[in-house]
Amino acid sequence: MIKRQEFYSEIHYKIFLTEHDETIEFFKARTLKSDSTEEEAALRSRFFQRLALHKLLAAYTVGEEISALLPLLEDLIDKYQIRQAKLAEYEQCPDISPLAIDAYPYQYEECIQVIGFCILLHRTDLLGRFVQLIDNAGYAGNDTVYEDLLCKVLPDRHDVDQWYHDVYSPLVQAIYAKTKEDATNFLEQYCSEWYDAFTQAPWHGTHLQGEGGSYVGYWGIEAGAIAFLYDIDDSKIDHMVYPKALVEYARNHKTPYREGSP
């Protein structure tokens, strides 16, 4: 394996995998502190969904083969569906989203990271399952980046000219740039501003914790998905958060996965 970010080592990854398995075993016979069975189930579902996301990110960061990410992405989408179901039961809101993408920039980022993974791995079947959870909560047709990621791979999307969070303005400008050079420059600007825009995110600064910390990588996966979908020249983009290996995989495997696709 050739690691994809300088802050992450194979030792770090081995520690993560060991703790990941130990955590799963630990919680098989234990519950999270809560005031009700429904609340505990909701908290548990988010905990294990985030654990699945961290495993996917860690595998990519350490340099695992791209094909090894596919089962991890499948498991993650399963976990989001469980999360939505348990949260809906607890909140008594059947169509609640597993992520509050309008209210919290880091949850929006999580959302479009997952969308980006689905696009770049050509798993439109998983993308449809995930997006349904977000759409059902009323988020469809309200955000440009969300819709522009989806419109080329899923049917009946929306054309909108607004977005929830300012950090994504350069990404929108990259999509609608008048020249290819401008598109590249906006994409590069987005990547350079990405990390500093998420100072309130729970993962911000985790690379400073050392090999026993919770860092699993910093990735603007959505930037790669936009470059792939809109044929943006990324040959000169060398920013740490830009997922070059995933984009290369997407471009070399242009026939999307179709079994069970929406």
Image: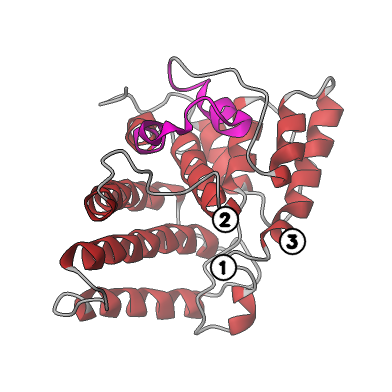
Q: Residue at x 49, y 80 (%)?
A: 11
Nearer to the camera, 145 or 142: 142
Q: Residue at x 33, y 31 (%)?
A: 125
Q: Is residue 143 magenta?
A: yes
Which amino acid, mark 3?
A: Asp
Q: Cβ–Cβ below 8 Å for labels 2 and 1?
A: yes
Residue 20 in view, yes or no: yes
Residue 137, given in percent of the width and then of the height, sits at 39, 36
Q: Residue at x 62, y 29 (%)?
A: 144
Residue 55's place in the image compared with 233, above or below, is below
Q: Which mark is residue 203?
A: 1
Compared across the picture, whether 190 is left or right of 102 comes to right
Residue 208's place in the image compared with 251, above or below, is below
Which amino acid, mark 1?
A: Trp
Q: Is residue 55 magenta?
A: no
Local secondary structure at mark 2: helix
Q: Which residue is mark 2?
A: 106
Residue 151's place in the image compared with 101, above or below, is above
Residue 133, given in percent of the width and then of the height, sits at 35, 38
Pointer 2: residues within 10 angstroms few (<14), some, or many (20+)? Answer: many
Pointer 1: residues within 10 angstroms few (<14), some, or many (20+)? Answer: some
Pointer 3: residues within 10 angstroms few (<14), some, or many (20+)? Answer: few
Q: CA distance from mark 3 to mark 2?
A: 12 Å
First in sequence: mark 3 vs mark 2? 2
